Image (cartoon, helix red, strand yellow):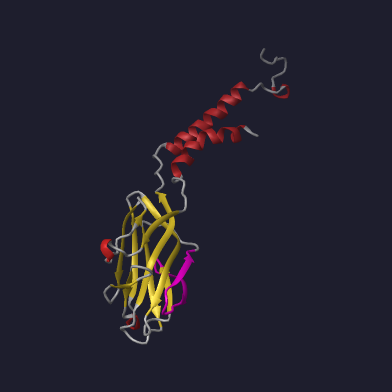
Amino acid sequence: MTILERARPCAFSALLMCQAGSPVQAAVLAVFDFDAAGGGFTTTPGLLHPDVATASFTTTLTPLADFAGNPGRALASSGFTLGNRIVLELAARPGQQLLAESLAFDARVSASGPQTWSIALAGAAAQSGPLTTAFAPVTLTFDGAAAAPQIVIEFAGAGASSASGTWRLDNLRVEGQVIANPVPLPAGLPLLGSATLAAAVLRRRRRSPIPASRRPAGSRAPA
């Protein structure tokens, strides 16, 4: 190992620690069962990760509704022949980013509702599958997703025979990671690392004896 290799970890360890974000682990970001106290309906999550600030449902066209769920109540909407989509948005707290890794939910449609579902994450198509008139579980993963301050998941339905046909969602669960934003490097830290490395090399040179082949004639090595 050369002097440069020995000095580099000491000189630049601080740089690496400042650049890296906090360690991440897979976690439950949000869970919805859509059941309120007393048998009512709510879109408030039953479980929300402490670093997720908000989690809310909207639609792009037809308002949200609720019907019998699996069990309890289920979130629902219609208007899928008109291009309606159900949208779930999760926003991270300041200084954090969210990475969606998987999504699970129970799905059911009415007889005139959409026949297939498709999911988009941050506007990019993820997966699709069939829908039936009985509740069935759906599980999918988001491969290659990027961390961002906000997760936007869109639920689109195709093949409905009527604009009044409905699609119900229940027992929805989003899992992923919460990632702390990297800490910016202080302006002078790279220069400090370079200076430390240079000083280590200079000290090494001063301490190393001059080889006999390079000493002036008649001189002796230091005692």
Residue 24 in the image: above or below residue 109: above
- Residue in the foreground of this view, choosing between 58 and 123: 58
Determine the residue positioned at 33% across, 67% down.
Answer: 72
Q: Quadrant of residue 209?
A: top right
| Main secondary structure found in the magenta portion | strand
The quarter in which the C terminus is drawn is: top right
Residue 175: x %, y % from top left = 43, 58
Vertical arrangement, residue 211 with respect to residue 117, above or below = above
Q: What's the residue at 45%, 34% (across, down)?
A: 192
Residue 218: name its quadrant.
Answer: top right
Q: Residue at x 28, y 65 (%)?
A: 39
Q: Tell me where the magenta segment starts and ends, as one range.
A: 121-142
Residue 97 is a magenta residue: no
Asked whether, in this view, residue 192 is left or right of residue 201, the answer is left
Residue closest to the far bottom: 161
Of 40 and 51, nearer the camera is: 40
Residue 52 image-quadrant placement: bottom left
Residue 13: image location, x then y, percent: 50, 37
Does residue 68 sit above or below 15 in this rendering?
A: below
- How many marks the image carries: the answer is 0
Residue depicted at x 31% and y 66%: 57
User: Can you give x and y, in whole percent of width and height, for residue 14 in the image?
Assistant: 47, 36
Name the residue nearer the viewer: 43 or 3. 43
Q: In this view, does 80 lie to the left or right of 27?
A: left
Q: In which quarter of the image is the N terminus?
A: top right
In this view, which residue lies farthest toward the front? 38
